[in-house]
Amino acid sequence: MSKNLVVRFAGEGGQGVVGGSELMASAAAESGYHVLTFATYPSQIKGGPAWGQARISSEPILTPGDSLDVLVCQNEYAYDANLPELSDQGIIVYNSQEFEIEHPRALALPTDDMAREAGNARAGTIVMIGAVAKAVGFSLEALESFITARWDRGRPGDAAIIEGNIKALHLGATAADESGFEIAQVDPPVEEPDARERILIRGYEAACLGAMAAGVDVFIGYPISPATTMLTYMESNLNGDGKFVGQASSEIESIAALIGAGFTGKKTMTSTAGPGLSLMGEGLGLAWMSEIPLVVADVQRGGPATGLPTKTEQSDFIMAMNPGHGDMSLPVIAPGNVEEAFWATAKAVNWSERYQGPVILLTEMSVAERAQDIERPDTSLISQESRSISDGSVENRRYEGEGVSPFPVPGGPGAYVANGSEHDEQGDTTHLADVHIQMTERRFAKLKTLNDGTFEAENPTASIAIMPWGGSKGSGRGAWQELTSEGIDIGWYYTMYLNPLPEELLAELRTKDKVLVPELNYMGQFAGHLRQLGVAAETINQYTGLPWRISDLKEEIKGHLS
């Protein structure tokens, strides 16, 4: 028996390799297993190398897995490219009508013919899933139930599709059974009677639900990979009195519309990727200057320019803090997994309302598109903070004082000008040096209200610590656990709240001889920021478009310990 099973479906875009991994993960989750998925694919609609991976485990999961137990290949290129990651005892399932290989643990299946025999010529991936399920001792009944639920859409041809897919599933299982192929089965899931209900959910879905739990009213976005899924999810789910979802014609229009909606008192949000955040820079500067609350979710991808639009990276941190010109420092919250995506987004909405300004939710493709089983969030724990509304007591002095002041809603007391030019207390434009000093200090002082960020700390007495951020949390945690089990004295720190950092966390980091920062970018952006704050930070970077593997990161950390 084994605690983990890692299955990768590899082929070309359009061959169902991503859907195959998700089908296995979904069925496993229904059976009580922990699951985590990851996929990588080209930006074109069809063609190009792609793969989807599912990790199934009887215990909680941190990463998609370092090595493969099962490799399912649709073509020869997929076999050649992915074979190095197959474990010594791993098996291969491949379409023998596409290519032939010599391998002692390979199962050849004429999947095209088998799919046609099942009555669904497009069910080749389902044939392979059946073979894999049989080889690893996975429940065919769970897969049947999922297939039925997946394709029962109330359409005339649904029954035939379901019947064909289930037949294809069993044809693959029979072929694997007759071949004698098998691999170590996964331990049965652990039943915990008092555990909270678990759900399988994607990162972008969790983020959207967190925003709705915090009371977001308006979501306006422009389609861009890999952030479009947030927009489409909100289009289907953010509804009710006073709620609005719109699709803008550009990111510039999107941010301008959010500023307008925020000016009227609405809680507003959008989603974009790095190129879109670049276009929003001037608008975010206006929101910072005029003190309009809003949230921008940046789903990071490879860059610059078009870069790697369907790959993952952590290279927008510098831009997220300073997206516009001049002196500004936007709050940044970066979730490290699907569960955190829910809480981080709710906090981003609340922070924007509390300090009355823009907040960046800095996620990334590997977190947003990942499916993961998590405890169903208790929405009663989410507070819905709302900006302090002007009652007219300060008349029209909207920008009075050194911190957050009451927000005048149009139609209510406290008329003012929401001005992007430097302005005095009531928003009138001025170029006087003393006023610019006063207002600049006011805007930065408001960040002090964002003082409730939490952090993780273990073995805080160690002189060297590791501190990953965002989606590198899982692999960083796995590497730290393995290093400490080997007797290496190293501390662990982590927080979603990157700007401003929790003050207690920053104080502890400044005492360390070395803080190692794993991140997915060339420049070591977060490590550089920590050095500016007086931390002896060293970056451990990777910029392949893929997440860290625990084994690779562990070796990199060892090289920095001396």
Image (cartoon, rainbow, N blue to C red):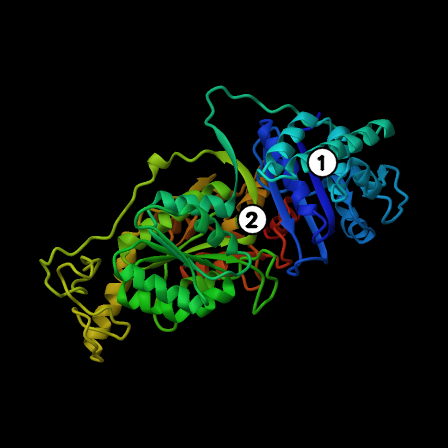
Q: Residue at x 86, y 46 (%)?
A: 97
- Element at badge 2? loop
On screen, residue 223 versus residue 417, left or right, reads right
Q: Is residue 414 above or below residue 424?
A: above
User: Marks 1 and 2: which is nearer the front?
Assistant: 1
Residue 93 shows which numbered tag? none
Q: Residue at x 49, y 19 (%)?
A: 193
Disc 1 + disc 2, Cβ < 8 Å: no
Q: Is residue 528 above or below residue 201?
A: below
Disc 1 to disc 2, C-alpha distance: 25 Å
Nearest to the observer: residue 112 or residue 477: 112
Whether residue 193 is visible here, answered yes or no, is yes
On screen, residue 279 versus residue 132, left or right, reads left
Residue 369 shows which numbered tag? 2
On screen, residue 138 versus residue 353, left or right, reads right
Residue 319 x/y as whole percent = 45, 65
Q: Residues within 10 Å of mark 2 (few under 14, many from 20)?
A: many
User: Based on the displayed image, in which of its 4 quarters is residue 77 positioned?
Assistant: bottom right
Instruction: Identify residue type, mark 1.
Output: Asn
Q: Residues within 10 Å of mark 1 (few under 14, many from 20)?
A: many
Check disc 1 and report the residue beneath it.
Answer: 165
Residue closest to the far top = 193
Q: Is residue 492 above or below residue 408?
A: above
Q: Quadrant of the N terminus?
A: top right
Nearest to the observer: residue 329 or residue 416: 416
Instruction: Identify residue type, mark 2.
Output: Glu
Q: Residue at x 58, y 40 (%)?
A: 478
Q: Residue at x 26, y 69 (%)?
A: 440
Whether residue 322 is visible here, answered yes or no, is no
